[in-house]
Amino acid sequence: MAEFSSASTLPTPPESQTRLHFGKLQHGCEHYKRRCKIRAPCCNQIFSCRHCHNDAMGSLSDPKERHELVRRDVKQVICSICDTEQEAAKVCANCGVNMGEYYCEICKFYDDNTEKGQFHCDECGICRVGGRDNFFHCPTCGSCYSVNLQGNHPCVENSMKSFCPVCYEYLFDSIKGTTIMTCGHTMHMDCFYEMAEQNQYRCPICSKTVFDMSRSWEHLDQEIIDDQILGFFANFRGIFIFVLVIAYLFVMADPMYEGN
């Protein structure tokens, strides 16, 4: 009877499939892992991603030269494996690697880290992360929110198409997490926590309380009551001492009183 090794029974993946994943998660920038760079049509310069472009162009000394990249305008990309410049596509036309495990033809968006659960929202017009099944699009607020907030949040028209009231970054396409306050306004989650640490409990936009302050109000009410009680006894003690002093003066002024 012939003997077979366990290795001989395992199917060998096609070379094309192996090539597609070559260099996965080994290239990119601080924002995304991807195997290509983009040529910005606005300034004809090469960057790892649009955020890298915006960070560089937004910090130019001349305000007139500052600008941001419109993601849909990207036409050309450069493969990080073979350095071939080509039209935007998922697979490199020269070396055959996936330039991004996730690729959106509309946004020209590449990302090798698919654990983020990227998906394109047609209503938002951009790609989101977190898994399509975990989000819904609110047409009033103009953005995707967690399904836990569906029918359970105050709507403010186009609330996400505004700037964070703390750090002033545009919220709609920010890569940072956001939160909806009880008043319906939105801000970065990190900014929200930082605001709370500074004992700031009101929305910076409308000044409404954004936390449940009932316990704090009860504590303040009790302090007022305690102060009133202490004030009453303090006043009573003062009156009592005043009466004793008056009585003492009357006694001392009485000619019938003989002091030693």
Image: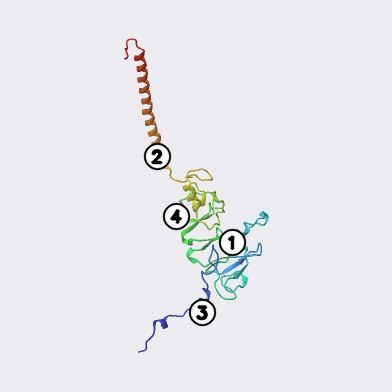
Residue lying at the far bottom in this picture: please name it: 1
| Relative horizontal placement of residue 235, taking residue 114 as reference (left or right) | left
**Spatial distance from mark 1 to mark 4, Cα to Cα?**
33 Å
List x then y, in percent, for residue 223.
39, 36
Residue matched to label 2: 219
70 or 48: nearer the viewer: 48
Is 138 placed above or below 6 here? above
Task: Classify mark 1: residues with Cα within 10 Å, few (<14), some (14-19) or many (20+).
Answer: some
Dots 3, 2 in contact, CB < 8 A: no
| Relative horizontal placement of residue 30, taking residue 244 as reference (left or right) | right
Residue at (39% x, 33% y) in the render: 227
**Spatial distance from mark 3 to mark 2, Cα to Cα?**
70 Å
Residue matched to label 1: 52
Residue at (48% x, 58% y) in the render: 135
Q: Label 2 amino acid? A: His
224 or 202: nearer the viewer: 224
Tag of residue 148: 4
Residue at (41% x, 41% y) in the render: 216
Label 4 residue SS? helix
**First-in-chain label (1 vs 4):** 1
Q: Label 1 amino acid? A: Cys
**First-in-chain label (2 vs 4):** 4
**Spatial distance from mark 2 to mark 4, Cα to Cα?**
32 Å
Is 138 placed above or below 98 here? above
| Relative horizontal placement of residue 242, taking residue 62 as reference (left or right) | left
Q: Label 3 amino acid? A: Glu
Res. 162 in view: no
Is 95 placed above or below 42 here? below
Residue matched to label 3: 15
List x then y, in percent, for residue 199.
47, 45
Point out the image quarter for the C terminus. top left
